[in-house]
Image (cartoon, helix red, strand yellow):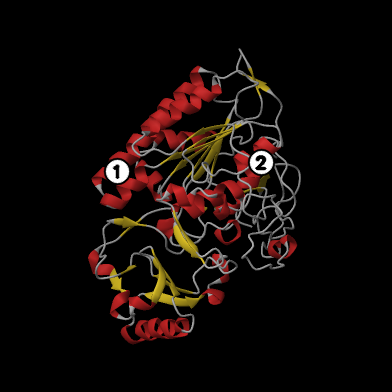
Amino acid sequence: MAIALSGGLFCLSVVFMFFGRGSSIYARLPHQENWAASRRERAKNIKCNPKITEPIPLAPKILSNGTAEFDPTVIILSFDGFRAEYLNRGLTPNMLSVGANGIHVEYMQPSFPTLTFPNHYTIVTGLYPSSHGIVANTFYDPDLGDDFNYGIPAKSWNPKWWGGEPLWETAVNQNQRSGVIMWPGGEVTKDVRPTYHIRYKSGVAAQEKLQSVLGWLDKPREERPTVIAAYINEVDSTGHDFGPEGKRTQKAIGEVDSALGVFLQGLRERNLDKVVNLVLVSDHGMSYVNNARCIYYDDYLDTSDLLFEESLYPHLGVWTKDAKKLNEIYRTLKRAQRKDNLPFQVYRREDLPARFHYNHNNRIPPVIAVANPGYVLTRRDMGLAAAGMHGWDPAAEEMHAILMASGPSFPNQGPEKLQAIENVELYEIVARAVGLHVKEGATDGVRNGFVSQPC
């Protein structure tokens, strides 16, 4: 069976669109190829036509907590690097309570590459990275002759990089208010900004961010945001430093769950736990790595030939100073992989697996090597400065993310977990929960609900 946001079947038709830099949602990034796959054609891949039961209401009515009226409201909390398996460790009673009171998806599959910036922006736009333009945490754009680096705000917050329309922009465009706390993309200076915004600052604890959310909910109705997105990073940071099995990572998991518990208590004290919608997500998982699993690509390549290296351990993307060198580099990596039976795959951009949805943007490197899960690609002079990493194939279990939700738009569906979904599906589900209109073909998703049983 399926649970939908309105009475329609989720096996809908859908059109792929590409989006411009800070422009309308039907503009596309100027360097992207214009491809004509339709939403209807993509939906053919869904082989079932499930019966719809217990519809989730579109734009539920105005609710009251006993002292104030509340417009339909959704709060999205993202726990960076929180892999789905962490929920099985007995450390997260508060997170699990959200799923128990609403819906708990088996896992949410991230988009490739399973990195922070591409996936956070996918969650709030419903677009694959190749569509919204943030194709990695660092990348090169040959048309702009410039490179993007998430760690350099002067570069990364320029609107030229960011396509699509994030949820907070959709809300403002449709006369609602939005609030963003440190979410990647929230600081981009487009024409339309979130109503409230807290800039990224390292070291801010989860509990402080969640108190800011409660502060926004305490505002008068005419000032209160109806779409709120907050980014929480502790689990990802410790996962990198100590690995997914490390004691410090275990502690961080428990600490963010405790912070969530304080937040949930704050909602209950305000009689809001059944008034506002709460959605818990993560951008990707985390996998253990060590020096024994390093593949040193400079043992095979002359790195002086490279113009730009998108080297993120799990995958390597290269641009060459001389375009004629690309075929040589591809053949060299391919030959090394076969000769030494190395645990990675090499692709030309156009030959990447279709399920990656990662070959329709000129920002994607023309040659890409993708390591097998648990292995990393690095240079001898870089080594490996982490115990945990992400970026691999989204289908790898260690990369699976979380998705739970509760509130008036996400009524309890019983103890069974719902079927996994891709993170491109979340934008429309969340938008409809607060009455935002999503134009046909505005996202890369094909569903508007959840599937509770296999077809």
| Left or right, residue 428 beside residue 315 | right
Q: Please rate how many residues cluster around mark 1, counting C-alpha atoms within 10 Å: few if below 14, some from 14 to 19, many from 20.
A: some
First reached walking from the N terminus: tag 2 or tag 1: 2
| Left or right, residue 235 beside residue 431 | left
Q: Tag 1's secondary structure?
A: helix
Using the image as rendered, state which of residue 59 and residue 369 is in the foreground: 369
Q: Nearer the viewer, mark 2 or mark 1?
A: 2
How far from the left and from the top, in percent, is residue 344? 38, 74
Which amino acid type is shown beneath numbered disc 2? Thr
Q: Residue at x 47, y 22 (%)?
A: 266
How far from the left and from the top, in percent, is residue 143? 56, 66
Q: Residue at x 34, y 64 (%)?
A: 374
How far from the left and from the top, in percent, is residue 373? 38, 65
Q: Please rate how many residues cluster around mark 2, counting C-alpha atoms within 10 Å: few if below 14, some from 14 to 19, many from 20.
A: many
Where is mark 1, residue-wise? Answer: 250
Q: Quadrant of residue 211?
A: top left
In the rendered view, would you say 408 is above or below 45?
above
Q: Is residue 232 visible?
A: yes
Residue lying at the far top of the rendered structure: 67
Q: Quadrant of residue 441?
A: bottom right
How far from the left and from the top, in percent, is residue 150? 43, 52
- Asked if the residue at tag 1 contacts the one at tag 2, i.e. Cβ–Cβ closer than 8 Å, the answer is no
In which quadrant is the C terminus drawn? bottom right
Using the image as rendered, state which of residue 448 and residue 419 is in the foreground: 448
Q: Which mark is residue 283?
A: none
Where is mark 2, residue-wise? Answer: 170
Using the image as rendered, state which of residue 93 and residue 312 is in the foreground: 312
| Left or right, residue 95 beside residue 430 | left
Label 2 to label 1: alpha-carbon separation: 37 Å
Which amino acid type is shown beneath numbered disc 1? Gln
